[in-house]
Amino acid sequence: MSIIRWLLGRIILFFDWLTQPKRPAHSPERQEQLDAQTGRLSLYQYAACPFCVKTRRAIRRLGLNIELRDARNDPAFRQELEQQGGKQQVPCLRIENPDGSITWMYESTDIIDYLRKHFS
């Protein structure tokens, strides 16, 4: 079963690479503004997870630079996600709010809706 999962993961990554969306051409000022806003965001994800791929593609389509945290291969990120976020589910967007509080957002569709609402 693990061989099949590994093979499917490679197929997902290959097609993601092959059909990667283009990043929009933001003006340098707009990109700087977006980078400042997204500096408070981190996406916990697995490379070959289909829902994570969907979320990363939306991030690229919007031209956002969001820190990607590999919760599968980095034990510190996995532990942080589970202990602070409450569960080990990806994708998960960690949002540092202006007041210093942290919001953990799960579900790819919710994350993409949030990013479109705040950064389109």
Image (cartoon, rainbow, N blue to C red):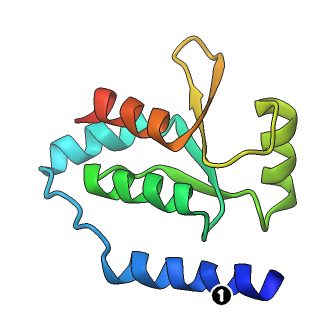
Q: Is 13 placed left or right of 16 in the picture?
A: right
Q: Is 118 placed left or right of 71 in the picture?
A: left
Q: Amino acid at mark 1?
A: Leu
**In which quadrant of the rendered image does the C terminus lie?**
top left
Q: Position of residue 93 (x, y in %)?
A: 58, 39
Q: Nearer the viewer, residue 4 or 34?
A: 4
- Residue found at x 80% / y 44%: 88
Q: Secondary structure at mark 1?
A: helix
Q: Is residue 91 above or below residue 48?
A: above
Q: Quadrant of residue 69?
A: bottom right
- Residue found at x 76% / y 32%: 85
Q: Is residue 87 above or below residue 65?
A: above
Q: Is 101 placed left or right of 38 in the picture?
A: right
Q: Position of residue 20 (x, y in %)?
A: 32, 73
Residue marked by disc 1: 7
Q: Position of residue 45 (x, y in %)?
A: 63, 55
- Residue found at x 17% / y 51%: 28
